[in-house]
Image: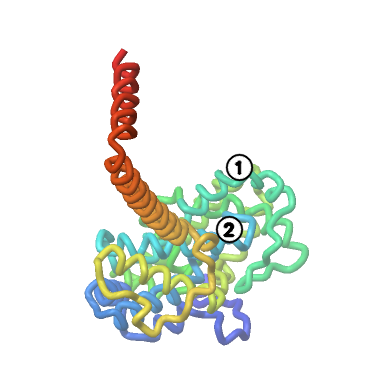
Amino acid sequence: MATAPSRRLDDPHLDYGAAARADEAGDEELLLQFLEGDAEGSADAFRSLVCRHGPMVMGVCRHVLHQEHDAEDAFQATFLTLSRKASTIRDRRVLAAWLYEVAYRIAVRARAGSVRRRQQEKEGMAMTATTFRPDQENQAAWNELRPVLHDEINRLPEKYRVPVILSYLEGRTNEEVATLLDWPVGTVKGRLSRARDMLRSRLVRRGLALSAAFLCTSLSQGVIFAEVVPESLVDSTVRRGMRARWDASGGPDPDSTDLPQDPISPLQAGPDSRLAAKKLIRRFADSRAVFALALILAVGSLVAAFIATDPVLSMRMQMKVQRFWTRLCH
């Protein structure tokens, strides 16, 4: 197996992961900075995490789902989950494995809940991978493989699943994986080889022999199953993640930082924005109810004052109120 990805495009924005790994800060340090840093430092750390692991997460979301919009929603939901639950992650060194599991679960739930699922599966994904572009004769095998690939990866035992995620989904070399996991390089190679065998046999049992052979050939050539993340989506995800972070901790308003403006409408962006919109609507409704009650009391006071000036009218009103209560009690 090649220890470095063999297929890359000359896109300066492609390899977010390699650019992020060039920095000295590891995932553990970035998570600590995100949780305990000031507004600017926390936002910078969160952006680094999104850029580092975003291509892998986007790959999972696009492979499981069938629409670009659905994949982007799942992508953002994954990192919003990270912003809320970062403090609960036990092994922060291998954040990629945690993000993979979260992204996969979110994408599967989104696919299961979509009323368009069957039609989308018939049509296939309109998107093509940016990092990995199979030739035309293998496109059918790739389309067949895509819906079940991550299902089988997710079923692998942890000692095989983690190196597969780091190597084949994030593009790390054998040496990088060995250093991160504190394993010998030979152990990494052996477990990746065993993982390929397991994936091939499982796909064959599913009746996907062609896809199984195609997958193993692709993996042995060092193909990376990652996707380019649009810069606008990174900006939007970072901004929404920081809002969730400050809402949870009661910190400063993220609008006071230099984060880019979120171009997504709160009613269309996702669950958190929709929740914020609902809260705003509820507050508006509550304020209208208070205003209506105040108006009723004011009008009632004026009517009472007017009736008090006319003894006959006052007596009639008292009799009507008494008859009303009598009927109500009986």
Q: Nearer the viewer, residue 286 or 257?
A: 286
Q: Is residue 25 above or below residue 67?
A: below
Q: Can you name the residue that lies furthest to the left here?
A: 36
133 displayed left or right of 310: right
Q: Are marks 2 and 1 in contact (CB under 8 Å)?
A: no
Q: Residue at x 56, y 76 (%)?
A: 230
User: What separation in Å lies between label 2 and label 1 (alpha carbons)?
Assistant: 26 Å
Amino acid on which the number 2 mark rests in the picture:
Asp
First in sequence: mark 2 vs mark 1: 2
Query: What colour scheme governs how the chains and residues are painted in the rendered image of this protein?
Result: rainbow
The one of 236 and 218 positioned closer to us in this rendering: 236
Q: Give how far across and how far down residue 172 sits, in percent.
A: 44, 74
Residue at the spot x=58%, y=50% of the render?
148
Left-right relation of 10 to 97: right
Q: Give the number of the disc on residue 53.
A: none
Q: Tag 1's secondary structure? A: loop
What's the amino acid at mark 1?
A: Arg
**Left or right: 257 with respect to 29?**
right
Q: Is residue 57 visible?
A: yes
> Percent position (x, y) of residue 111?
57, 49
Q: Residues within 10 Å of mark 2 (few under 14, many from 20)?
A: some
Q: Which residue is mark 1?
A: 206
Q: Position of residue 118 (x, y in %)?
A: 68, 44
- Residue 309 on image: x %, y %: 29, 43
Q: Which marked residue is nearer to the observer: mark 2 or mark 1?
A: 2
Picture quarter with the C terminus: top left
Q: Circle 1: is it few (<14), some (14-19), or many (20+) Cα within 10 Å?
A: few
Determine which residue is flagged by label 2. Answer: 70
